[in-house]
């Protein structure tokens, strides 16, 4: 697992600025390729964490890390820079190493992260509905006032 995470997130180093990046950032430069291939390897890390009986809340946090990486990764250039800085696979590896002990409980930070991500997803899901209703309201369709 450590080898996959390292290859995906930290294989290469820019010598002048000492910034590490991996195949995830490089594959992201090819439109569509990185967005389709690197989540497969991230899913492998998730599967291994599941097999190691990592707590479900931590697995959920790992899924959010991968999802955030995949979603932001779809934005050209910004997604590649995000891959270099965020390093979702290395984060997930650290979570697995910290929580692979079945007697170790998830931290409060794990729960907070998951709840914030769920709230963010709920907000993003409601945003189109709110915008649509606002459009109807300001166009006069939802009000009793005439359109002109």
Image (cartoon, rainbow, N blue to C red):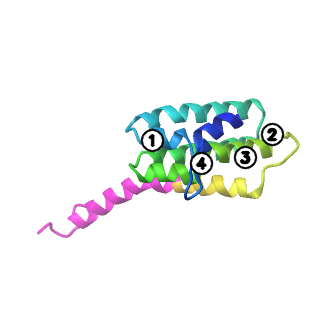
Find out whether the residues at labels 3 and 1 contact each other: C-beta distance under 8 Å.
Answer: no
Sequence order check: which comes first, mark 2 or mark 4?
A: 4
Q: In the rendered structure, which segment of residues is drawn in magenta? A: 121-148
Residue 71 against residue 32 in the figure, above or below: below
Q: Secondary structure at mark 4?
A: loop
Residue pointed to by mark 3: 94
Residue at far left of view = 148
| Front position among marks 1 and 2 | 1
Q: Earlier in the sequence, mark 1 or mark 2?
A: 1
Q: CA distance from mark 4 to mark 1?
A: 13 Å
Among numbered discs 4 and 1, the one appearing first in the sequence: 1
The residue singled out by tag 2 in the image is 100
Tell me the mark number nearer the camera, choosing from 2 and 3.
3
Mark 2 in CB contact with mark 3 (< 8 angstroms) = no
Q: Nearer the viewer, mark 3 or mark 1?
A: 1
Image coordinates of residue 91 in percent, x first then y, are 66, 48
**Which residue corresponds to mark 4?**
87
């Amino acid at each position: 697992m450590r080898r996959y995470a390292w290859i995906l997130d930290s294989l290469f180093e820019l010598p002048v600025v000492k910034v590490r990046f991996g195949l995830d950032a490089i594959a992201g430069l090819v439109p569509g390729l990185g967005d389709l291939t690197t989540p497969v390897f991230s899913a492998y890390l998730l599967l291994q964490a599941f097999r190691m009986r990592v707590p479900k809340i931590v697995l959920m946090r790992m899924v959010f890390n991968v999802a955030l990486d995949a979603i932001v990764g779809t934005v050209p250039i910004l997604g590649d820079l995000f891959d270099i800085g965020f390093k979702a696979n290395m984060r997930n590896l650290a979570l697995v190493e910290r929580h692979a002990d079945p007697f170790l409980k998830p931290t409060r930070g794990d729960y907070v992260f998951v709840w914030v991500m769920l709230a963010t997803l709920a907000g993003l899901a409601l945003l189109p509905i709110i915008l649509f209703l606002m459009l109807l309201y300001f166009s006069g369709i939802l009000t009793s006032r005439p359109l002109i």
